[in-house]
Image (cartoon, grey):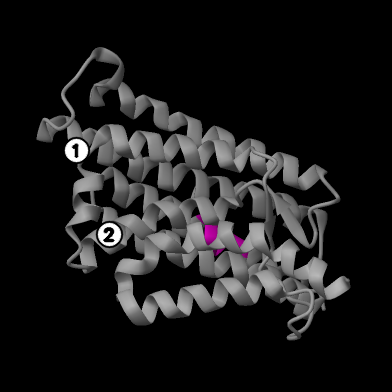
Amino acid sequence: MTLTKHVPNLITCLNLAMGFIAIIFAAGNDLIVSSWLIAAAMVFDFLDGFSARLLKAYSDIGKELDSLADIVSFGIAPAMIVFQLISYGSTAGADSCSYFCNPGTLKYITVLMPVCAALRLAKFNTDTTQTRSFKGLPTPANALAVISVVIAAHYSDAAVFELFLKSPVAVTVYMIVLSLMMVSGIPLISLKMSNLGIKGNEGQYILFGLVIVSLILLGIASAPLFIPFYIIASLISPMFAGKTEG
C-alpha cells in the first residue's frame, strides 16, 4: 500500500513533465509537437484521478500537485503556443494596424491565460460545490481549445484554420475569451460519470454524440468544435434533467 499510494502523484508528475517539454517545443516554434505533448498531459491528468480512485490513494499533496501541474500544462504551455502564433503574425505582416493591435504588443497579453488558469485552479481547490460540475471553463478544456485549432490547421485541408492562426488579432481575442471563461461562473458539466445510465448524465451523452457525429462528418477538422459542443451540452443538459425529474 505504501508504494501504490504514490502512483497517482507519479502520473501527475508525468503530466507536469509533458507540459514543461511542450513549453520547450513551443519556444522552438514546433507547435505541432507542443500540442501533442499537451494532449499527452491531458491523458496523464485523467489517469492520475482515475488511479487515485482505483487505488483509493487520495492525499492533500496530490490535490495541490495536480493543480500545480495543470497550471504548467494547461495554462502556461497553451499560452506559449498563443504567444508564438501572435509573434509569427508580426513577422508575416498580418493585421497591421495601431499600436494596441500590433502583434508586438498583443503577444504580451498572453500572460492573461496562465494567470486566469491559476485563479481558476485556486478557486476550484477551495470550492466544495464543484464535485459533479464546474464553475468556469476547466483548464484542460482551455488547453484543448488552443491545441485543437493548431492540430486541425496542420492535419486538415480546411484553410479557415490557417487563416485564423495567421491573424494576431483573432488569436488574441480567442485567447482572451478562453481566459475569461476560466474565471467565469458559467456552469459546465463534469465528464465523470458515476454510472452509465442516461438519467443524470444527459449532458455527457449529448456531448459524446455531438463529438462522434462531427468526427464522422468532418474528421480532424472537427476538433475545434469540441469545446463549443462541451459548452452547448452543459447549457442544455439542465433542460433534460428538469424533464426527467418532472
In the displayed orientation, state which residue is furthest to the bottom: 196
Residue 74, percent from left and from top: 51, 50
Question: Circle 2 is placed at which residue position?
Answer: 32
Instruction: Kindly indicate the quadrant of the structure image that contains residue 49.
Output: bottom right
Q: Position of residue 87 (x, y in %)?
A: 23, 33
In this rendering, would 16 be left or right of 235? left
Q: Quadrant of residue 89?
A: top left
Residue shown at 76%/85% (left/top)?
A: 197
90 displayed left or right of 27: left
Q: Name the residue located 65 percent from the left edge and 72 percent from the top edge.
A: 204
Residue 223 locus on image (x, y percent) = 38, 66
Whether residue 7 is visible to the viewer of this picture, yes or no, is no
Q: Secondary structure at mark 2?
A: helix
The residue located at (26%, 34%) in the rendering is 168
Q: Which residues are magenta?
A: 12-16
- The overriding secondary structure of the stretch rendered in magenta is helix
The tag earlier along the polypeptide, 1 or 2, is 2
Q: Say which mark, if any, is on residue 68.
A: none
Quadrant of the drawing holding the C terminus: bottom right
Q: Secondary structure at mark 1?
A: helix
**Residue in the foreground of this view, choosing between 149 and 233:** 233
Residue type, mark 2 in image:
Ile
Say left or right for 56 vs 50.
right
| Residue with the most extreme left position | 92
Residue 189 highlighted magenta (yes or no): no
| Residue under pointer 1 | 88
Residue 188, placed above or below residue 122:
below
Q: Is residue 53 above or below residue 120?
A: below
Q: Residue at x 79, y 79 (%)?
A: 199
